[in-house]
Amino acid sequence: MRADRVFAYGAAAGLLGDLLLGDPRRGHPVAVFGRAAAAVERVLWRDHRGWGALHTAVCAGGAVALGAAAASAVRPSRAASVALTGAATWAVVGGTSLAREARTIGRALEAGDVEAARARLPHLCGRDPQALDADGIARAVVESVAENTSDAVVGALVWGAVGGVPGLVGFRAVNTLDAMVGHRSPRYRRYGWASARLDDVAGWPGARLTAVLAAVAAGDRRGAVRAWRADAAKHPSPNAGPVEASFAGALGVRLGGTLSYGGRVEHRPVLNGVGRAVVVGDIERAVRLSRWVGWLALGVSAGVSLLLDRVMRGPALSAVPTLPHSRLRSSEGTPIALRNDCPQGLGTES
């Protein structure tokens, strides 16, 4: 089994695991990483960009190194490599938890229990729920579903296709660090700068792929593309902009506008201004669109992995002479079957 198939099978198994099991209530690997990152922060914190960059390098670099060590340890076994890729994919994606939280809030709103919806909203995003009415909560949920489809699903698959298990865990580590220290509070304005910028870079390809796939899966494809092209650049986030604009056009709704974070009011540009206001029923539509985008992203990332594997294997294959009947013969004329560890590079894992 070649490297591209290892990723494809493992990533598919991981997404199925997330669909069937969701996230564990205790001992989630991302939560373990968060506690470790918080411990590093307690040692390193200074109100300085350099110390923040060191914190980012230690935490994200440590996660990548751990993933690389694990992948190297199981590389001789294809089954173990698939299992590790599946476990890593399950650990870093969060599509089921995202859908579950969104639907919980949606059910509360449908029942008219705005207070319950407000109490649950912090599980999904960092906005001030007390400043939102029912429609404002619904809009916040749709925007969070859109953004987290990129952050919690598509971005991880993209980097998994490129870097295998280290890419999967590395992306999730960077994304988690941004959530922890990348915001513009007085404590993290300088210390979290490196984490925020690294997250912008790491999230760039996944955000654009999410926007493309949202348009592909949309009922109104032209509307999704139109909103993306017209409004994405208006958003203060270089990655949330394309995703939220494409989702807005795909769903035919308006996103953006006034919102509040921890008492700080922001007036963001409206995305897809020709759309209608968000209603509670749009939460379920956003969740379904997010699911479609996630599975489409699996197909695209598996294809990327296949392409990269062929590119990496190409020079080695071109250097090997054509052998009749795919066999070598010893000096005594006895056929020698080609092995996976053949020094010419045939059948090896890139």
Image (tube, helix red, strand yellow):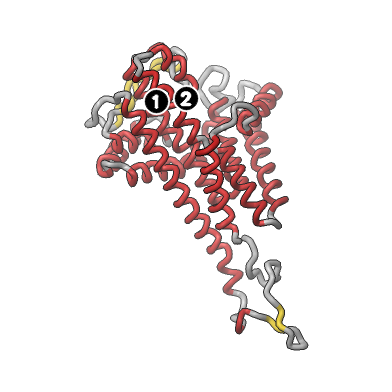
Badge 2 density bin: few <14, some 14–19, many ≥20, Cα 10 Å: some
Q: Secondary structure at mark 1?
A: helix
Q: Are marks 1 and 2 in contact (CB under 8 Å)?
A: yes
Q: Which residue is mark 2?
A: 124
Task: Say which mark, if any, is on residue 174.
Answer: none
Q: Is residue 79 left or right of residue 275?
A: right
Give the quadrant of residue 325: bottom right
- Which secondary structure lies at badge 2? loop
- Given residues 27 and 301, the one toward you in this image is 27
Residue 78 in the image, given as x and y percentages of width and height: 65, 56
Please give the name of the residue rendered at 42% of the width and 47% of the height, measured from the top-left corner. 296
Q: Specify the amino acid type for callout 2.
A: Leu
Q: Quadrant of the C terminus?
A: bottom right
Image coordinates of residue 76 in percent, x first then y, are 71, 57
The label on residue 141 is: 1
Between residue 345 and residue 92, name the one nearer to us: 92
Q: Nearer the viewer, residue 250 or 21?
A: 21
**Residue at the left extreme?**
274
Q: Compared with residue 170, is residue 260 higher up or lower down, i.e. above or below?
A: above
Q: Residue at x 32, y 19 (%)?
A: 135
Query: Residue 130's quadrant in the figure?
Result: top left
Residue 198 in sight: no
Image point 66% across, 26% down: which residue?
35
Going 71% across and 79% down the picture, which residue do you hit? 336
| 344 relative to 112, above or below | below
Q: Residues within 10 Å of mark 1 (few under 14, many from 20)?
A: many
> Outermost residue, bottom direction?
332
Give the quarter of the image for residue 316. bottom right
105 to the left or right of 70: left
